Image (cartoon, rainbow, N blue to C red):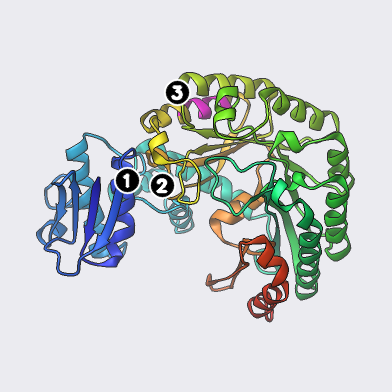
Amino acid sequence: MIQVICREETYIYNAYHMTKAFYPSAEVVSRIEEKASNYVTVMVDGEMAAAVSERELAKGPSGKVSSVYEAGIGEKKHQTDLALYGQLKAKTGRTLSWGILMGVRPTKLAMQKRREGMSPEEFLRWFQENYLVSREKSVLAWQIASKEKELLDRLDTKDGYSLYVGIPFCPTVCAYCSFSSGELSAWRERIDDYLKALCNELAFIARTSEGKRLNTIYIGGGTPTTLSEAQLERLLTCIDLNFSREHLLEYTVEAGRPDTVTAGKLAVLKGHGITRISINPQTMQQQTLDRIGRKHTVEEVKNAFFLAREMGFDDINMDLIMGLPGETVREAKDTLRQIEELSPDNLTVHSLAIKRAAKMTEEEIKNAECIGDMIKEAAGAAGRMGMSPYYLYRQKNIAGNFENVGYAKVDKAGIYNILIMEEKQSIVACGAGSVSKRVYPDGRIERSENVKDVALYIQKIDEMIERKRKLLTDF
């Protein structure tokens, strides 16, 4: 048991997640004690492992007066993070590849410094000194920021927007999943009701967004191809009737579970002009698929991929998760070998993250220390397939404090994925559990959330629409 004790709430997030990163397999709890003698204290099995006091705030990770502290980048909180990192590093003998960065969008800093005119070498030095990020990850952040800028320049950030459509159903719920998805067996009789509510919301969005330029559409979930052919046809026809494609750059549908992919469904997608699909194995190890509840075979992954290719889909993404229970670098290399034989157009490599809502527990994760090697193997495989990294994000409780990276072949990068990370364009989202984000010209962002529960979404669709009316006033 590890306890993280903070004097103020402002320190809790980074202190908890940094401690968790240094002790990935341990149970970590945090609390606030306003009268605590230290700003942050970390107790490991009843013994003090780190203590950041008032005096420590003048010191950096080396224990000497810090030369890396820079006014305006977090001040006292930043110094606290540096001091805590130094003590935990000394205690464990480990380093974190992303240093003291605990947020989900590290490339935002690279993008900001790029806009300010910083050269690559200046950025690398600044990033490593101020945030203790490894040179390898600093280079990756700069490389991705450059690619993101190139793609974002194609978008209309003033009058444009993107549309997200959520389908919260899956054949089964995977053990690691925390999304608001329901098993098809439990909701089969309500799907048509769900689509009716969803189409009402879509029609409202179309009316409200008249005059705006729709740049990307992303239908995610869940697993959208859990829908029947007729239901897919109904949904896509609704979108066709309500939205113009005059300015559309990308149209993605997740076909993530290969056991939901059929020739008939792919024909529906093709007939409605879908430009990009995802067929996501997560791993090509049958024993692991069985363990995590995927309920499909490796052969079904390959069959679905080849079927999509035969039907003319030339922009296919595949997702992999590094660090799944029971897997080592050997299994990861074998999975990557099989993916290379398929040669998809995009490859998204995730580091396993365990959320509170997932069935899988942290006790099942025994291999966090080798995820870094798995990620390096994945980067090498992506390079051999002619892919380069184009977007990156991190999650809470991500094993080993690593990251998720999207790789793509030339002209195959997923624009919507970048929008989610950089928040430069409004995303209007519909469906249960979806979150709309309106981005204002001054950079301010306002959000509107839909309820996660499918039955409540159906029941309260008028309330969901009213929420959007408030968000999209004068849109």
Q: Is residue 417 above or below residue 378?
A: below
- To which residue does mark 2 refer? 397
Q: CA distance from mark 2 to mark 3?
A: 20 Å
Q: Secondary structure at mark 2?
A: loop
Circle 1 Cα neighbour tier, 10 Å, few/some/many (<14 / 14–19 / ≥20): many
Q: Are marks 2 and 1 in contact (CB under 8 Å)?
A: yes
Number of the label disc, if any, that sits on residue 75: none
Residue at left offset 18%, top offset 61%? 39
Judge from the rendering whether residue 20 lies leftward or rightward of residue 178; answer left or right: left
Q: Nearer the viewer, residue 165 or 275?
A: 165
Is label 2 in contact with label 3 (beta carbons under 8 Å)?
Answer: no
Residue at image position (12%, 52%) is: 65
Q: Which residues are magenta?
A: 376-382
Residue at mark 1 to residue at mark 3: CA–CA distance: 21 Å
Q: Residue at x 42, y 48 (%)?
A: 119
Residue 290 quadrant: top right
* Residue holding disc 3: 328
**C-alpha gap between disc 2 and disc 1:** 7 Å
Magenta region includes residue 326: no
Which secondary structure, mark 3? loop
Disc 2 residue type (three-letter): Asn
Instruction: Locate the N terminus and report the quarter of the image it occupies.
Output: top left
Q: Earlier in the sequence, mark 2 or mark 1?
A: 1
Q: Is residue 28 visible?
A: yes
Instruction: In the rendered structure, find residue 20 and report the number of the disc placed on it.
Output: 1
x 68%, y 54%: residue: 154
Give neighbour class at mark 3: few <14, some 14-19, many 20+ (Cα, 10 Å). Answer: some
Element carrying mark 1: helix
Q: Quadrant of residue 436?
A: bottom right
The amino acid pointed to by label 1 is Lys
In primary-sequence order, the first of circles 2 and 3 is 3
